[in-house]
Amino acid sequence: MFFMSSPSQALATVIDSCQPKAMVALGELGKQLAQRWAEHQPCDVSVLTPEAAAKALSLSKIQDLALVTDALEQLDFQQGQTLIGLLRNYGTRQIAVLVSDDSGWTDRDFIGLGFKRQEKFASETDSQAFTLYTYNINNYNHKRTWNNPQHWANPHMWNKAWW
């Protein structure tokens, strides 16, 4: 967990830890942070609108990081799931999603998509709360002790009989 005081700081920490060379941003805050990063580091930034991305997401290359802010609130749930699924399926290495707690998305929705909840934020300007979720292709699926040949059914019969 990041334990930052604001969503901007938490997302900046995600960007800094990722050191992206290619980044896609959806939403105003994501766009601002991505452009600020690109001013100081060589980075190819693609900016998409939530509506366009939900209809036909096409990325020219694998992205190191996707920042999704102010976006899922503008889409219905099915479109949001499709958008996140497409980002993952296009091979985006890390995804950071900042979503309003009033959006209808729950922890279970993000956990089901392989995300981890990083932190909750209360807005300074109004009573709205936000949650930051992250996905990292390198560690989203934890190792399980049972998921190896030693614990599969009938390992003593391997290579002995073919049906």
Image (spheres, grey):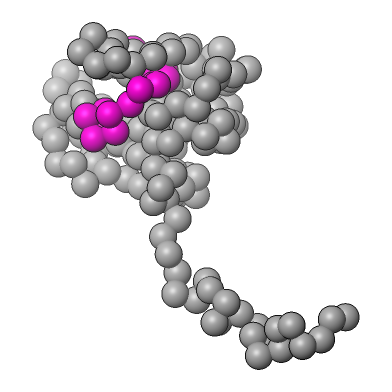
Instruction: Say if the magenta span includes residue 123.
Output: no
User: Which residue is at 33% across, 30% downward?
Assistant: 98
Residue 129 location (% of width, % of height) = 25, 31
The magenta region covers: 14-28
Q: In the rendered view, does 89 fall on the left or right side of 66? A: right
Residue 153 location (% of width, % of height) = 65, 83
Q: Residue furthest front?
A: 159
Please state, as top left, top right, bottom left or bottom right, where the C terminus lies in the image: bottom right
Q: Is residue 152 above or below residue 157?
A: above
Front residue (pair 156, 142) = 156
Front residue (pair 143, 10) = 143
Q: Residue furthest left?
A: 5
State which quadrant residue 14 falls in. Answer: top left
State which quadrant residue 31 falls in. Answer: top left
What is the tally of numbered marks visible in this picture? 0
Front residue (pair 70, 86) = 86
Q: Residue furthest right?
A: 163
Q: Is residue 22 above or below residue 115?
A: above
User: Which residue is at 45% across, 26% downward?
Assistant: 63
Residue 85 location (% of width, % of height) = 56, 35
User: Which residue is at 49% across, 49% downward?
Assistant: 112
Q: Is residue 77 above or below residue 3?
A: above
Front residue (pair 33, 82) = 33
Instruction: Say if the magenta span includes residue 17.
Output: yes
User: Which residue is at 22% across, 29% downward?
Assistant: 16
Residue 127 in view: no
